[in-house]
Amino acid sequence: MSAQAHPAFEFLRSERVESLNIDVAEYRHRKTGAQHIHISTDNPENVFLVALRTVPHDSTGVAHILEHTALCGSEKYPVRDPFFMMIRRSLNTFMNAFTSSDWTAYPFASQNRKDFNNLLDVYLDAVFFSRLDELDFCQEGHRVEFAEPENPDSPLVYKGVVYNEMKGAMSSVSSTLWHTMCEYLYPTTTYHYNSGGDPACIPDLTYEQLKSFYKTHYHPSNAIFMTFGDIPAAELQESFEDKALSRFDKLDVHIAVPDEQRYREPLTVEQPYAFNEEGSSDEKTHIVMGWLLGKATDLEASMEAHLLCSVLLDNSASPLQRALETTSLGTSPSPMCGLDDSQRELCFLCGIEGSESNRADDLEKLVLDVLRDVAENGIPQEQLEASLHQLELQQREIGGDSYPYGLQLILTSLTSATHRGDPIALLNLDPVLEKLRANIQDPEYIKQLTRRLLLDNLHRVRLTMSPDTQLSAQREALEAEKLAAIKNNLDAEGKQAIVARAEALKQRQEKKDDESILPKVGLEDVPPEMAYVSATDRQTSPLPLTRYSAGTNGLVYQQAILSLPTFSNEQLDLLPIYCQSLTELGVGDKDYLGTQLWQSRVCGSINAYASVRGKPDDVQHLSGFMTLSAKGLSNNHGELSELMQATLESVHFDELSRIRELIAQTRARRESSVTGNGHSLAMTAASSGISPGARLTHHWGGLAGIKYIKQLDAALADSGELERLAQQLVEIHQLILNAPRQYLLVGEEEKLADYRQTLQQHASGGTSDGFQAFSQPGVHQPVAELWKANTQVNFCAKAYPTVPTAHPDAAPLTVLGGFLRNGYLHRAIREQGGAYGGGASQENNVGAFRFYSYRDPRIEGTLNDFDAALDWLQNESHEWQQVEEAILGVIGSLDKPGSPAGEAKETFHAELFGRTREVRENFRNRVRQVQLDDLKRVAATYLTPERASTAVITNPDQAKLADALKLTPVSL
């Protein structure tokens, strides 16, 4: 590869990674020592990331608050909010900022070269020349205000975006578990602290401390630049030098995380966590064991730890996973189970949830007995090979469906770069995988590894966290007491200063900045047509089959798609459970353990799911499919096809204890999802009366689904109910087997013919005698609900019935969501209201327009802001640029690329539901033609008060608000 560098940089080394078809080079800035890792590829989606080593020494959230505040205006772009302004002035495929435990990163991606350069200019200025205005610190971090901002006689309250974000984050039991475990597993290093910020500590951070942290940590000498794509490294380096680095000298400050001091004996910890749910707190205790392992920068040691983790926990046939799933000590394995490699030193965690504190000794004995058995008797060779197979699949797969693929590769390397290891080595795992393949031929290898990493490792923590129904109230009382003390110490001048600052912040938030100083792209930069992935071919016999050629790097993706039949209401409620069970139970002559091992040996994943959508021109007319989806290495395609066919044809539902475990695990996972996904759940609830597709989404994946799985799990304590459930799953399966089926294959073009031949040898077209297609009655029912959950913050949503994709008004409604968010909701809900996020969107698949807030301290004020946004639209004057920015946002999301296989699968399923290329192109063209009058017209037509539905998620203490808000309380 060409390793040409800009004169300001020196080239250090380069390496070709054949398995990923990339070239990686490392450079160093001569003057400051800044590191640059460039991944060269012919991918036009260019990615940039600059990371700073950020090592806090307390839990005030200084790194996190700085990440937010740095994006609030810079030297070249002295506007209040350039980051969010650029989101809407851009065709980016990704824009964000992250705070990890020991680094802060600012990444973006774009397929448009002009847009990439615009964003690069803004990002470099934001990171290295931030203004750090004190009012921005107050807005994003924390501040005290009077509950009535202009009334000094009202109580003081804490406000701040990060403050409320972390209140929401720490409502999650999983987050509480993780941070508490780190507090004890890392007693002396930065991981002992909550880098995001503990709400109890965040108010202790001062503005001066923030500026001091910025001065030392946000310097090129402490920076790592990482790039991916087809822009030459030297061209990127020219921008780095001209726009930022030339103005700095080397800073003689070495920021690093030291090695942790090791325990001489295991530690046992018991702590409470806040439990705010209604009902009993019995069997709500979490028991987790954690081990501190070696350095993440030691590639071989890291991969050995990954291998051991896979051997122990990869699937239900893995010895430790099996023990945790089947034990009566808890309801399911802990969500903490696994290996964390994001910090300087690795840690391995395992445990259970749904337990009691007096079972901790028994859990520890169970885990150690499993480890001793592995250390003494080893693991069957077939299982070792399967675990190594999973590591190889993870190395080979080309991602890009959630994050851009280039960003995934960059983040893979970032931990090692942060700790001055070898970031390139982490991208080329083939040599290490080959060494591991040789190592596992020795029967003693896995035995010795288990002893060395776990059994003989005394740096071990056993954490028991039990529910405390009073803890939240105690924390609120302490906060109120602290605020009251602050107020009591204020003289008249001090009170007036708080009132004045609140007014100054409000004026700053409402001030209209000159956005013209920021670079932008316009509609003229939008490609005239959307990118389209065409099927390579389609056949109807001997099997209905669609094939797509894609660059999959030696992987094959295969799906069996079956039309949904007519179900009873009870069967419909159980369909997600059937889909989950299909790939988790025994097949043919194998029990579920044997089947899990078979899956691990031949495929990277296998899962089933049901999907339903309305027609493009009628959301009340529903169709649906069940998809069995798998992926694997190409040389395993024959076995993959055999596995998929056997799963469909010969799964058995007689493993009652396994079904019981699956329900318990699903319940635990779904219950813990509320605080991380509350805005989506609230929108789904608010939309549930608008169309049958929206109702099913609420019942399958929404709050109604969580409530249903809780009730089902409780009912299954009766063995008769469990037998009845198994029989219902058999009946659903028979209906599915009698449905028409078709197949999808995605792989490299030269292998598609072989894949088709292999598939046809194993698969069948099924029978469809007497098949009755799935349908649902129309839905038109307003919703007004207040859902009570275990959360310290709120999630609010309003929904209105609108139109589907093919309707001409779908385009302006979709643009309207971004227009309202950009122009009004972001300021009112996030900046002034203190929520972590808020906005609006049109969901064409269910014909609903939804407002939402995320991790919100308010309820009534936010619901009023939703209405006020519509008044603002109709009564204020607006410029064309605001409309153009909202259009660009929609086009950017429509044109966002995925992985090669992901794009093929997405196209196939869109067309399965009638979203043909013509339908999607027409919608995209209508979006490009939207005018301001269209936005006002569709808002006046569809978003009227009498059509609104409302759903709120809050804690039980807030249920008293339900009557005033005219909402019906619902217990989760």
Image (cartoon, rainbow, N blue to C red):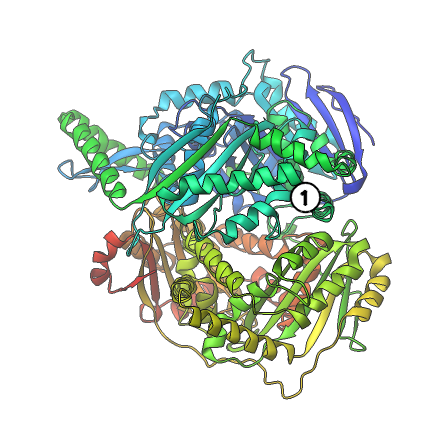
Measured as percent of width and height from the top left, residue 29 is found at 67, 19
Q: Quadrant of residue 769?
A: bottom right
Measured as percent of width and height from the top left, residue 707 is found at 38, 63
Q: Quadrant of residue 628?
A: bottom right
Q: Residue at x 45, y 56 (%)?
A: 670
| Towards the viewer: 541 or 549 | 541
Q: Dot 1: few (<14), some (14–19), or many (≥20) neighbours within 10 Å?
A: many
- Mark 1 lies on a secondary structure that is loop
Q: So how many labels did they put on this image?
A: 1
Seen as rendered, the residue at the extreme top is: 252
Asked if residue 571 lies left or right of residue 527, the reply is: left
Give above or below for 7 relative to 894.
Answer: above
Would you name the residue on which mark 1 appears?
379
Measured as percent of width and height from the top left, residue 157 is found at 24, 38
Quadrant location of the N terminus in the rendered image: top right
Measured as percent of width and height from the top left, residue 956 is found at 26, 54
Seen as rendered, the residue at the extreme bottom is: 770
Give above or below for 579 relative to 523.
Answer: below
Specify whether residue 513 is in view. Answer: no
Amino acid type shown at disc 1: Ile
Specify whether residue 382 is in view. Answer: yes
Q: Residue at x 66, y 29 (%)?
A: 301
| Towards the viewer: 439 or 874 | 439
| Towards the viewer: 730 or 341 | 730
Quadrant location of the C terminus in the rendered image: bottom left
